[in-house]
Image: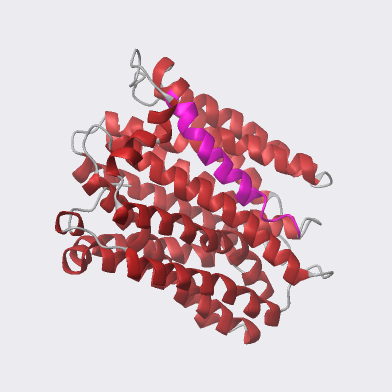
Amino acid sequence: MIRTKLSVMMFLQFFIWGAWYTTIAVYMSNHGMERLTHWPYTVNPIAAIVAPFFLGLIADRYFATEKVLGVLHILGGLILFAVPQFTGSPTTFILLLLLYNLCYMPTLGLANSLAFHHIESQEQQFPLIRVFGTVGWIVAGLFISFVLGALVAGGAAERTAMPLYSAAVASVLLGVYSFALPHTPPRAAGVPVSFRSIAGLDAFKQLGDRPFYVFITASLLLCIPLAAYYNFTQIFLGTASVQKIAATQTWGQISETGFMLLMPLMFARLGVKKMLMIGMGAWVLRYALFAIAAPSAVFWLIFLGIVLHGVCYDFFFVTGQIYVDKKSTPAVRGQAQGFLVLVTYGVGMLIGAQVAGRVYNSVLGAATSLTLEQWGRFWWLPAGFAAAVLVFFSLFFKASKTESVGQQPVR
């Protein structure tokens, strides 16, 4: 019964994110904000940077987890309902998205901690619960493209506010549902807390050696071209005349699920450095495929680039979680993982969103959208950047034997 409740929680948690995150740039481009599409992918990492401090200073110390989860999702859902009303005021539109993300991003950690509190085996039980989050993201894309698309003239629901409203409804629904989740007392009540521990600086100091510094630097740098994928792939698909944009992108999550199952076998055979290099190489290949496909809108090459998401994400980010876990002691394990998230999804994605947005606008010039030929030139830039990170990592990273092999962590 508890596992079912937790699985439903994960499904809704990632349905919400998948519904708006993969469509917001298309919506903005069709409502006069084509030069501002990088801002949702800027405010999201800002919220990711703030989230650990909210969790460490407030949520983990004073309030039951399920209640904080419920309040944040209800408040976030109400904000999302208001967002489409301000398409004529871009500044307000983006500020509301910032407020929404400040509500949503802490719930990722809250949902995980709530689940961990009520299961006996993290390694065996949590993946079976967390996989429903990936399913929720996939269902969101299919729902938008096929269910909502059937209600819209031309079938392009991604261009309308319907995905935002769908995410808002799901957010309020999860907020109400959260109060029915098992009671989870604050895990750090009465425990002294410091800025250094929340930011992961204590863990950084303990884990610090040359390979770790190279890994963290490469992780941060790789997230700069990564931001271009989340922001601009949906717009690129529209220019390439792909009709079911959200559904097409869900193949990335389907691939992610499949490669996740292969990771233990691959990790045992290849070790951490080769796994990380394959993940980086997949990012280079993905952007190269987009660039080659762009001038003639060759769909099978674009589709292959999307399907590579499983290798891109699992082989680099999940392997990175394994590497950090292997280096950590129990005392700093949570801090270390939090520091990795802060560096990648926070600082790295923040820089990447701004860089990608500026590059896109410079290529755009006075036009309202890129031509297919311009898309080809655009995608070679993140491909080259990711290739440079790959070369840097391959030359300077060397893991010890004890860090080269390990078990797959939970996500």
The x and y percentages for residue 338 are 39, 39
Q: How many marks?
A: 0
- Residue 156, compared with residue 210, is above or below; it is below
Applied colour scheme: secondary structure
What residue is shown at x 40% (from left), y 18% (from top)? 61
Looking at the image, can residue 4 be seen?
A: no
The x and y percentages for residue 377 are 64, 79
The x and y percentages for residue 95 are 71, 38
- Residue 403, compared with residue 178, is above or below; it is below
Residue reaching furthest to the top? 190
User: Is 91 on the left or on the right of 411, as rendered?
Assistant: right
Q: Is residue 37 magenta?
A: yes
Q: Is residue 136 magenta?
A: no
Q: Which residues are magenta?
A: 35-56
Query: Which one is nearer the viewer's eye here, 282 or 238?
Result: 282
Looking at the image, can residue 96 be seen?
A: yes
User: Is 376 on the left or on the right of 58, as rendered?
Assistant: right
